[in-house]
Amino acid sequence: MSINSIEKFPTYLAIPPLKKDSMAGNGPFKASIEIQKDLGFPGEKVDNWQQVAINKIAETKSKYRSVQVFLDSCMKCGVCTDKCHYYLGTADPKNMPVARQDLFRSVYRRHFTFAGKYFPKLVGAKDFDEDMLDDWYNYFHQCSQCRRCAVFCPIGIDTAEISMAAREIMNAIGVGQKYPNQILGKINKIGNNLGMPEPALRDTLADLEEEIEEETGASVKLPLDIKNSEVLMVTPSADFFAEPHIDGLIGYAKVFHQSGVSWTLSSYASEAANFGMFIGNYDVMRQGALRIRKAALDLNVKRVVVGECGHAWRVAYSFWNTLTGLGSGGSDEYSLKLQNQLDSNYPQPQHMIEFTYDLIQRDKLSFDKSKNDHRVVTFHDSCNVARGSNMGDIENGQFILPREVIKAACNNFSDMHKSTIKSATFCCGGGGGLLTDDLIDLRIKGAKPRMHALKRSEQDNGVNTLAAICAICKSQFSKVLPNYDFDPYMIVSVHQLVSDAIILTKDSET
Amino acid sequence: MSLISIFFTLFFYFSVLIFITGLSYKVVQYWNTPAPLKIPIAPAPLTKSGVFLRLAKEVFLFATLFKSSKWTWLFGWSFHLALVLLFFRHLVYFWPGEIPLILLKTEPLKYAAYPLIFGLIGLLGRRIFVDRVRYISAPSDYLMLLLIILIGASGMLMTFANNHPNMLLVKNFAEGLITFQWSELPKEAIFLAHIFPVFFLIAIFPISKLLHGPGIFFAPTLNQVDDARKKRHISNWAMQKEKNTKIDLDHNQDKGS
Ligand code: SF4
Ligand code: SF4
């Protein structure tokens, strides 16, 4: 395919003709009895599952306006059909957003609507039988809840809401996905997705401090559990051990070091990620968020800052105030307790990018941009940041701020094609609880649209570095980049770029 | 009155009754169902006026559809606009008593039938020929398009091909429906073929995908202000849950939920 022929398609990628059942299968590994029970779900598929599921659908649609309205309002216009990266990458028609919703909608129609009860064939209503449940399990775990389809739907129908509700319903009948549910068990018991206990975390941070000092000569600290610090830093636990994430963590530490603002990590709340969102469970999501509330209160901090993690930032920005009162504007005793403690001069919570951007704006950081001159950088807008949050409280701030931070640290920046960035960004292919090896085939195929856009940027502008602010994106790209003939190390944290270029004040100079 | 006039008269009231009760039920249901979380979709407005503008652009211009698919926008927008214009064109028949001047000047609106048919044929063609859209289409999706095409085509045949039914009968019938002074309708097949699908669509409005009309106003993705950090947004059921969990504020101990 020549570049010119690619250009004709709004998505870079030819829209594939349907390949029915190309992704049929059993779906990802199911959660064990213990994992399910830990989260308060039935351990195994309950006997009268169909009735339980129908009741749960009734409950869910009565608690979530999104679900009720979206189930009713789809006009089958089909303009979302070519907007999902999983459809573009797999050609399986059930990966078209509307077809994915229809798995749910057909059951809803059959059991809850007049037309579906009396004229099922006419309106495409279907019984909730074993086959349908298998399709639910398989295809609602082929949705990364990236919400790209929602950006393009004229009615604002968000398939992510439907897929979250579907997973919630499946969990309620004892059919859960192993990967997110196992991780949720760990965060509830130990405080982070890795199950990394406090001593291990402390060691890791000490090692990092040594490493930074050796390399830069500056005694940059990574404090843990320090009461009365100004800032509580909550970051995805991947930042503590995985590459390239860890270089981002070093970047945050250097920025804090330069800012002079005291900060601390928490061993109790050592995880920003909140997989409770992926399984659509309000209570589980709230439990995760409450750990952060508790840490903020116990450590008596003035500000809460969130590290580079896509869905974590959506949960923090859009949901924390709701779930835990971590934000502002609350009037109840519960949220006021926290809100009175936090410094109202700053948005609560704040993203690390906002923190760094603010310092850059106030000329508090200096950079040697030439340190990044071997790079031509492009930025991957992570779905949850791009479509479910804001930064800087300015319109489209979530697109502007990260790019400004990158440009402050790098001389060479070039965006990918405009139909694949910002609100139209393509998912990395591994979000929404799909970042597991048992879904690797799907992950590789789902990355295709993003990889095409990157390939084009590589050819046209010599892009050799892909920067992101999401732990899942970073892990996913490290894994799938080689499949598309890229260097797996080209993916970096935005704060790694900051880290490499920032000029540190040595202790002797202060 | 003849049997057929009685049938259509009853059919009209039946449809309107279902329309009003069904739609009220749906709107009340949407209204009463909480949106527990802030889920505005990008590009999300940060203010109320921003939301207002966003919805206005969606409702009047189909802004998102334009972004998503130009052809579908062209078909869909011209079809809907034509529907609105033709609605005004038809008011004159139903208006009881003295007809306001403005309604007497709606005659040229009849030409909206052309974009109506153009849009509908386009949408139907898309449904038939684009494999992705064909896959997601149920029989009812075709049926609805065909019914509206039938309405448009029969209307055009009457208006532009000199098949006018007796206009006095039309006027008396339509006005009679509003004033409860029922009278005979014209019995030409083409007229009946025109009004039957209209009444039918009115009836199925609240039990079909036509609910996308009210639905768009209730989509939290479109109607929420993106201000979650500044305002605490919490649903009744979540607030109740929060109270029930009795968090020990002094010792900061969450008893779990
Ligand atoms: S774009 Fe929206 S209304 Fe159209 S088919 Fe997709 S989900 Fe349905
Ligand atoms: S949310 Fe993303 S992954 Fe899910 S259907 Fe929509 S575009 Fe596809």
Image: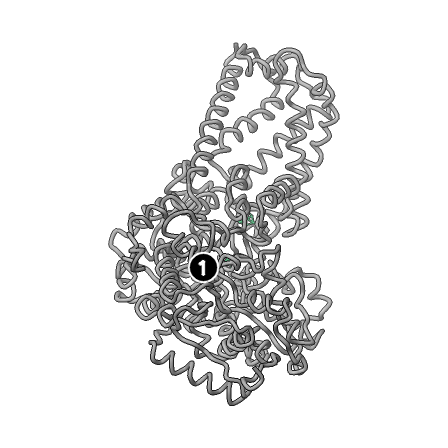
Q: Would residue A126 be visible to someone looking at this image?
A: no
Kindly tell me whether mark 1's CB lies below 8 Å from ligand 2: no
Q: Which residue is mark 1?
A: A342
Q: How is the image coloured?
A: one colour
Crowd rating for badge 1 (residues with CA inside 10 Å; few <14, some 14–19, many 20+): many
Quadrant containing the C terminus of chain A in the rendered view: bottom right
Outermost residue toward the left? Answer: A47
Horizontally, is B237 left or right of A402 in the view?
Answer: left
| Figure quadrant of residue B32 | top left
Q: Is residue B174 above or below residue A53?
A: above
Which residue type carries mark 1?
Leu
Quadrant containing the N terminus of chain A in the rendered view: bottom right
Q: Give how far across and how far down residue A28 sits, in percent.
A: 39, 67
| Figure quadrant of residue A402 | bottom right
Nearer the observer, A94 or B156:
A94
| Figure quadrant of residue A194 | bottom left
Residue at the image position 40 percent from the left and 52 percent from the top: A336
Q: Give how far across and how far down residue A422 sits, in percent.
A: 61, 61
Horizontally, is A323 left or right of A153 in the view?
Answer: left
- What SS does tag 1 mark? loop
Question: In which chain is the residue bearing label 1?
Answer: A
Q: Is residue B212 above or below residue A462?
A: above
Nearer the observer, A44 or A222:
A222
Horizontally, is A55 left or right of A391 in the view?
Answer: left
Q: Would residue B17 be visible to someone looking at this image?
A: yes
Nearer the observer, A318 or A338:
A338
Nearer the observer, A204 or B182:
A204
Q: Give how far across and how far down residue B206 sits, in percent.
A: 48, 33
Q: How many marks?
A: 1
Q: Give how far across and how far down residue B167 sits, in percent.
A: 67, 15
Residue at the image position 61 percent from the left and 18 percent from the top: B94
